[in-house]
Amino acid sequence: MTALFDGAITVEREGWRLSLADGGLPAAVREELIGCALDAARGTRGAPRRRSRHARTWQAKLGAPAELEIFIKLLDAPRGRELIKRWVRGPRSAHVARITQALADAGFNVPPVIAIGLEAATGRELIVAPRAEGEGPLRTLAALRSRPLAHKRAVLRALGAEIARLHRCGFVHGDLTPFNIFFVRAEPPRFFLIDHERTRRLVMPGRGRVRLRNLVQLGRFALPGISATDRMRVFDGYAVRLAKAARRRLARRAHALLGRRIRRDGLAPVHNPFGEAWPRRGAS
């Protein structure tokens, strides 16, 4: 794995090749970061904070007193189609470092990648990044419920506008769920996007359908304090620059794609963000 950072420090430990951004971190904190990452790889760091299908994530605080809060993501070795993608595209961690920098260069709020790693024997990978600014979705929604209605509406429309800006810049998030968006309570509101293993910048035709999938990912989750009307406000913020006919056409296409997704997932009906019945996970 080549160094991906200006002034990167490359370290080889226990079969891992790690590339760390310098970023002014004291040497002792860098060593602590390496130790935490290797603990995660060995399985000696305790239970992960989050598990997904192909990865586990741990949280750690470095330095004294807790100068830097980080997340360590351990990616399983690729198999099947993922292995073929590795041969063609290179390591996933390298992609995350590159796309994160591209997003930052385009003016989006993203936590910088401060270390990546590849285990030669197994193909496992590591990604280390600081905690995103702001609050995760569930705490944010609780906070929004206590604010004036006009403020809540403005935040939801601002979120839609930010996703529209992401798409206009050619980026498509690989997993645009509310859990991968952090909200900073400011004027105007700011949003941090995390989890960029499948985020990409599109240069080929046909990207409209991929963008629609982002709207479906964002709209299909029922969260406390957020109604179907609220989700529609996110959509309105996204589509605000479209003519009325184009907005309706986009809503119809998003609803059709959502319907196919929920039939595939076997969900049961609740109200959807585009105005018709859609399923809710766990309903009978």
Image: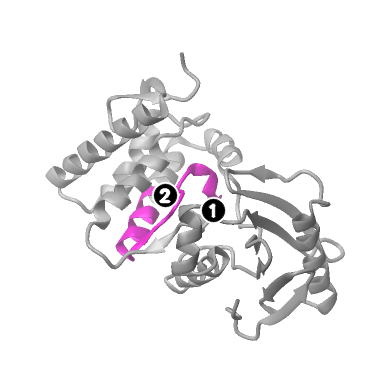
Horizontal side of 221 relative to 169 (left or right) equals: right
Quick one: label 2 or label 1, which is nearer the N terminus? Answer: 1
Q: Which residues are magenta?
A: 159-183
Q: Amino acid at mark 2?
A: Leu
Query: In the rendered image of this protein, does residue 260 appear above or below residue 9?
Result: above
Q: How is the image coloured?
A: one colour
Looking at this rendering, what residue extends furthest in the left direction? 245
Side (left or right) of 235 relative to 222: left
Judging by the rendered image, the residue that carries numbered circle 1 is: 79
- Is residue 179 a member of the stretch shown in magenta? yes
The residue beneath circle 2 is 159
User: Dot 1 lies on which element?
Assistant: loop
Image: 13 above or below 193: below
Residues under labels 2 and 1: Cα distance? 35 Å
Q: At 53% from the left edge and 38% from the top edge, which residue is drawn? A: 144
Instruction: Name the amino acid type tagged 1.
Output: Arg
Residue 51 in view of the camera: yes
Determine which quarter of the picture holds residue 275: top left
